[in-house]
Image (cartoon, grey):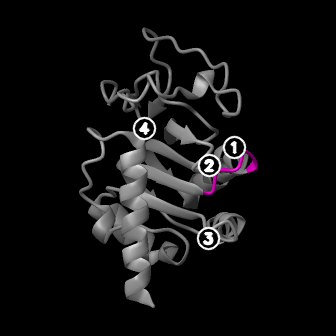
Amino acid sequence: MHDIEPHYHWRDDYTAEEDSRSPFFGRQYDEFRFSQKVYNYYIHPQWDAFGSSTLYLKILFVDYTEQYAILELIGEWNDCLHNDIMFLKREIIDALIQEGIYKFILVCENVLNFHGDDDSYYEEWYEDIRDEDGWICLLNTLQHVEEEMQETQLQAYVNFGGPFNDINWRPQKPKVVFEAIEGLLQRVTKRLY
């Protein structure tokens, strides 16, 4: 796992450590010292810790004008034992919402497991952004992760699975990814109503 780096092709356009509005502003990275682990495996030092012992992330891009953020996650998302959603919501999402971000794309292809529990933090997140036409979308969830999320009833608050899987987002620019996801969400919403 130590060789899985966060997506770095957008670093010319955005870095969270240089964004004064980011929760990671001013953070410095040691490219040669591996200290963070998922299970017993070291992960690349570019991943950011936010309070969880098994889940890490990287804020890949934020557009304050269009009000969206793209985050990439790695590890085990464990709400049952570690209440990871609480850490994610309180340490990262709340800070971004305070800066006017209401649309969230979370790349989940490196989320190896999901263990659900209560959905109250997801509901709170949804309530915090819905009046601003906000949304939450998880990209490229693994099948067993998606199944556990469905069993936890997260689909009431978060968009994932189906058209949001197998999206080739890496070669695209952030705005293209955002517009594609927003277009998919509009089509999915029209089919529901």
Place residue 4 in its image quadrant: top left
Inspect this view and state whether residue 15 appears.
yes
Name the residue carrying label 3: 118
- Identified at 50% across, 68% down, the residue is 158
Q: Is residue 51 above or below residue 42?
A: below
Name the residue carrying label 2: 88
Q: Nearer the viewer, residue 144 or 4?
A: 4
Type of amino acid at the residue the image marks with label 3? Asp
* Residue 60 located left or right of residue 21: left
Residue 91's disc is: 1
Q: Which residues are magenta?
A: 98-102
User: Is disc 4 surrounded by few (<14), some (14 to 19) or many (20+) residues within 10 Å?
Assistant: few
Question: Mark 2 and 1 residues: CB-CB less than 8 Å, in contact?
Answer: yes
Instruction: Name the residue furthest bottom.
Output: 193
Nearest-to-viewer mark from 4 and 3: 3
Type of amino acid at the residue the image marks with label 2? Leu
- Identified at 42% across, 45% down, the residue is 175
Disc 4 on helix, strand or loop?
loop
Type of amino acid at the residue the image marks with label 4? Tyr
- Identified at 24% across, 57% down, the residue is 166
Disc 3 on helix, strand or loop?
loop
Is residue 24 one of those drawn in magenta? Answer: no
Q: Quadrant of the C terminus?
A: bottom left
Nearest-to-viewer mark from 3 and 1: 1
